Amino acid sequence: MATQNLPPRDAIRRAAGELFVRDGYGATTVRAIAAAAGCDPALVIRHFGSKEGLFLAAVSVSGDLTGILTGPIESIGRELVRYVLDGAESPVAGVYRALLTASDRPEIKERLRASVHDVFVGPLAERIGGAYPELRARLAAAQFAGLINACWLVADPVLACAEREAVVALYGDAIQRLLTCEDPPTPGRPGDSNAGTGGPVG
Amino acid sequence: MATQNLPPRDAIRRAAGELFVRDGYGATTVRAIAAAAGCDPALVIRHFGSKEGLFLAAVSVSGDLTGILTGPIESIGRELVRYVLDGAESPVAGVYRALLTASDRPEIKERLRASVHDVFVGPLAERIGGAYPELRARLAAAQFAGLINACWLVADPVLACAEREAVVALYGDAIQRLLTCEDPPTPGRPGDSNAGTGGPVG
C-alpha cells in the first residue's frame, strides 16, 4: 500500500479506502486500518473521530459518469448500461458496495442520497425537457441503481451470460424512455375510464 | 415480544427477525437476540451455528408480490410501482434493508440472488412472450429493485414528494415496456449504420 511516505492523515485515508472497498464496511476495523497505515488506532480516531467519519472521508462516488451525463442526450440510456456492464470489477463498484452495505447508518445514507443528487439527478434534470424533469431524472437514477445492484451486488448469473447488446438495447431504451419520451404515459390504470386522474404527465 | 411461551428455537428466531428488521444486520448482536429471547447467547449459537445462520432462518422475502405477478400481465408494471410506493413502512421493507446491508456476506448474497429468481424472475419469465423472456424478466426485476432502493433504502425526498400517479405512470410503463413491448428495440447505438450488430432483439 506504499503509505510510509505519506503524512499520517493521508496514509490512514488511503489505507481505509482500500480496505473498505476490498472488504466492505462491516468487516473493516479501525485496528486493521491502523495496521495497514502503520500507526496506532488511537491516531485514526484522533484524525477522523470514528469509523463512520473515516469512511465518509475515504470513499467517493463520481467515476466518469459525468462524461456520459453531459454527452448526447439521445444515447445516455444505452451508455449508462454499457458503463454498468463494463464496471463490475472496477474500484467504483467496490465503493458502491461498501456504501450500500453501510447504508443503515444515517450519516452514510445521507451521503448516498447526496451522491445520487449531485452526480446524477442534478446535472441530468437540467437537460431534460417537458414535464417533471427532476422526477424523471430521479426515476432514471433509480433504474440505473437497479442495474448496478443486479450486476455489481447480486452479480446476477442470467445477466452475466446474457448477450451484451441485447441488455444494452432493452434496458438502455427503458432508461431512455424517461429522458426523451415523446409520447409520455398518462396516469391511471390501463383500461381505466378515468385515465386522466392525477393530472397530465407530459 | 411475547416470546416466553415459545420453545427456545422459535423464541430466538422470532426475536432475531424483529431485531434484524428494526436495527439491521450489522447492529444486531447475538447477545441482544439472546436477551430478547430470554436465553443464554450460547443457546443461540447451539441452535443456529452463527449470526449468519440465524439471519437466514429468521428473515424471508416474499410479501404479496405473487398476487401482482400472476395478475393481468398488462398492468404488472404499474402495480409493481404501487406496491413499492405503499410499502416503505412495511416489514418487507425492513427485511429488504437488512438483506441488502448484509449482502457483502457470501451466504446472504446467495439468498438474495435465490429470492430474486424464485419470487420474481421464475414466475414472470413463464408469462412473457417473444424473445429473451428470462432476460427481460430479470431486467424488470432490476428496475423493480432500483425503485425499492430509492424508496425504501435511500428514501429519496424527490420521490417522497412526487405526484403519486405520475410516478406510477412513468416508472410503471418503463417496467411494462420490458414485459410486453411490441416494438422491441434493436441493438446498436442510435444512429449506428450497423444497428443489427449483436443479433435481433424481438
Image: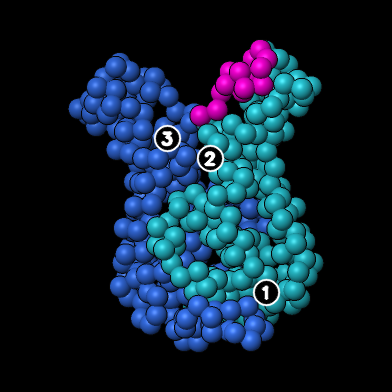
Chain colours: A blue, B cyan
Q: CA distance from mark 2 to mark 1?
A: 31 Å
Badge 1 element: helix
Q: Which mark is residue A71?
A: none
Q: Is residue B5 visible?
A: yes
Q: CA distance from mark 3 to mark 1?
A: 42 Å
Amino acid type shown at disc 2 = Thr
Most foreground residue, B22 or A107: B22
Amino acid type shown at disc 1 = Ser
Amino acid type shown at disc 3 = Phe
Query: Nearer the viewer's eye, disc 3 or disc 2?
Result: 2
- Image coordinates for residue A161, horizontal then vertical, percent: 66, 58
Which chain does the numbered disc 2 sit on? B
Whether residue B179 is situated above or below residue A116 in the rendered picture: below
Whether residue B78 is situated above or below residue A151 in the rendered picture: below
Q: Which mark is residue A20?
A: 3
Q: Determine crowd level at label 1: few under 14, some 14-19, many 20+ residues with C-alpha closer than 10 A.
A: some
- Pointers 3 and 2 in contact (CB under 8 A)? no
Which chain does the numbered disc 3 sit on? A
Disc 1 marks which residue?
A: B75
Asked which quadrant contains residue B25, the reply is top right
Q: Which quadrant is home to the C terminus of chain B?
A: bottom right
**2 and 1 marks on the same chain:** yes
Residue B31 belongs to magenta span: yes
Most foreground residue, A69 or A182: A182
- Image coordinates for residue B187, horizontal then vertical, percent: 57, 77
**3 and 2 marks on the same chain:** no
Query: Nearer the viewer's eye, disc 2 or disc 1?
Result: 1
Q: Which mark is residue B101?
A: 2
| Region in magenta | B27-41
* Residue shown at 63% from the left, 47% from the top: B92
